[in-house]
Image (cartoon, coloured by chain):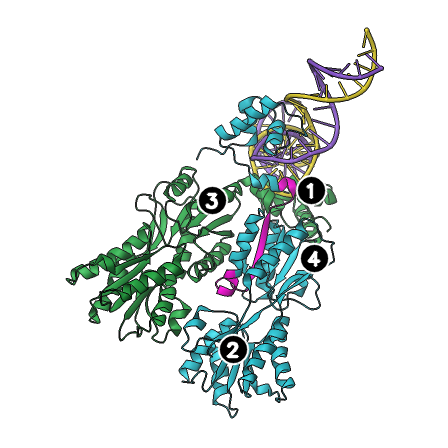
Chain colours: A cyan, B green, C purple, D yellow
Amino acid sequence: MNKKTSLKDIAQHLGVSTALVSYVINHKEKEARVGPEMVKKIRKAVIDLNYQPNLIAKSLKSGKTKTIGLIVADISNPFFSTIARIIEDEARKQGYVVIFGSSDESAEKSQSLISVYLNRQVDAFIIAPAENTEDQILGLHKAGIPVVLIDRYFPEVPSDCVMINNAAISEAAVQYLIDKKRSKIAMLTYKTKLAHIEARKNGYKNALKSNGIKFDRKMIREASYQDIENDVTTQLKDLFGGPQKVDAIFFATNSLAVYGLKVINQLGIKVPQQLAIVSFDQSEAFDFFYAPLSYVSQCLENVGKNAVKLLVERLEQKVKPKQYATVVVEAKLVIRES
Amino acid sequence: MNKKTSLKDIAQHLGVSTALVSYVINHKEKEARVGPEMVKKIRKAVIDLNYQPNLIAKSLKSGKTKTIGLIVADISNPFFSTIARIIEDEARKQGYVVIFGSSDESAEKSQSLISVYLNRQVDAFIIAPAENTEDQILGLHKAGIPVVLIDRYFPEVPSDCVMINNAAISEAAVQYLIDKKRSKIAMLTYKTKLAHIEARKNGYKNALKSNGIKFDRKMIREASYQDIENDVTTQLKDLFGGPQKVDAIFFATNSLAVYGLKVINQLGIKVPQQLAIVSFDQSEAFDFFYAPLSYVSQCLENVGKNAVKLLVERLEQKVKPKQYATVVVEAKLVIRES
DNA sequence: TTTGGTTGTTTAAACGTTTAAGTATAAATT
DNA sequence: AATTTATACTTAAACGTTTAAACAACCAAA
């Protein structure tokens, strides 16, 4: 209840000006030539009165809030919450704090989050961009607000970003299935034009092509983000009920796999005898599936750390504007029993 | 790059005082008796110059940041990230933004997070408190900062909090095991004095007692948060390797269960034939264990929503100070095959 | 004709900081 | 002794808002 002590309180308490106190607190007593015993008095008062700086006032003055806005598709998805945790830790080490929001893959929600955060004067953004948000990213660039894209990226919008080798690792994953003598390989993916998903599809297609397997459109199935559970169910039932004899499936993300596995169980399909599986990303569920799933492992630690690193470099202007960096984190294939 | 427009810019552009502009923007044209065509001019300029209020300046003036500090044990734990997501959504609806931090169950980290957030003038906290942080909560109360505790609580520290019926539902869970003719029931829990865990232990003990089963200290095993994987492994190996013939186990949290299940698989123990299992909380892993796990389901939606509701009521002073509310969200037992 | 009310607008202080510039005194250099 | 320089501190403006109070011009009623 009792008001917090401000600089002014300390100044009054000692009968000096706030300037002096400010200098001492900011360790500028040298430059400002504050007398040594004055320094001591102020230091003591700071402790006695338990002074805590008001960062809002500082922000107003400096124009910097030391706050990063984090926008992902859904913070409750372990993929994003793991990244969030790493970003949080890294950011705090650098004196930043993170505010977060979930876009639910909606461009409008994304825009609204960006606006709110801009009004709150965040210094920078880390964004896993939703589809059709290119202009939002461009807008931030124009406004001179640092942004680092993670997970997804826009080939046409140069930007700092941290991505993985989507196409190559997808190709490797599918190649692994082929090496296991599978040739009727399906893929379950999202209905989206986002480049990281496109790259995964291309990896899939390339693997087929370079092994002389004809690509069948019916073997790529798509689910919408908004209605994932239903879509996965109908698509997979249709896929496995159809004329094609599917003997392997590649899941483009962990959520797709989790819902997909439920359908596969429901249909009584035996893994890996009848169906081999590789999924993107990790999930606790994969470990407990009766045939522990093989998956593409992204090092989220690297993703998060690099994102914060890029951002801080940008914020401290160690990098030239308009010169964007792309960090590629190498994903790797973890082979298990599926 | 081009500076953002401020109130002053608009005022200058129109050759009027900032006061006028402020009144119009805040819809106080009536009270301030601003002339009708002036209102129009200002409205137009606001749009033409794309004015966006600086919330930092507003905060400095008002002393309110419309920001909630969220502190949980680990945001990457799905239990907490799910709650975080709900809190985020609810808070935004009320015009609040959430900054988050993970305490890793450490009182020091928790204190440091609280300090950082206080310096940033957050309006209120939602905290899943770590052990030995009673004084931190009391400190916030003394400072008049609203706090809502979630998941955990301190019986000796009255505070707004949202909790579940830990003891009762634990008793019900163990009773279920007993009804299934199990009598050698073990429990795996955290090494902590936190009341919610104590309550779960008491529920376990009560169920045994009311069924005339003698409580055996050796049947309660504890793991430390810091070294959970190792501890779970050694404790369970010791438990199942010992003289007691364990025929059921009750896990006090989802993480304990996830690590525990791995050990159980490793030891080749058959569920539910040799061992019946009930766990607290949910996990994707539970669905894919070969015998889908029975568990205690907490409605996290209710937890999150109630937490924000309590907080907002407190912030808007609809509630008397020193009169704290406890919301109990009823958990329920979900029976499956384990 | 004073008094009072209405209407429309400005002034200025305040929130808690930072910091360039100013002032006053003492010490050092001519 | 006069000037410079160093030392120790204060002043005041600024960041972008809000808002009570003041002001000016007009109109109406006594």
Image: magenta residue range = A60-82
Residue B162, horizontal then vertical, whole percent: 36, 53
Q: Nearer the viewer, mark 2 or mark 4?
A: 2
Q: Read off the chain for label 4.
A: A
- From the image, state whether disc 3 or disc 4 is nearer to you: 3
- Disc 3 crowd rating (10 Å Cα; few below 14, some 14-19, many 20+) is many
Q: Which label belongs to residue B114?
A: 3
Q: Nearest the camera: C1 or B302?
A: B302
Residue wearing tag 2? A278
Q: Amino acid at mark 1?
A: Lys
Whole-angstrom CA distance, mark 1 to mark 3, is 35 Å
**Residue C15 appears in which quarter of the rendering?**
top right
| Image position, residue B48 (x, y; %) | 71, 53
Q: Chain of mark 3?
A: B
- Nearer the observer: mark 1 or 3; the answer is 3
B326 to A156, vertically: above or below = above
The answer for which chain carries disc 2 is: A
- The amino acid sitting under disc 3 is Ile
Residue A80 part of the magenta segment: yes
Along the viewing direction, whichever of B290 and B23 lies nearer the viewer: B290
Residue A140 coordinates in the image, percent (x, y):
67, 57
Circle 2 Cα neighbour tier, 10 Å, few/some/many (<14 / 14–19 / ≥20):
many
Q: Amino acid at mark 4?
A: His
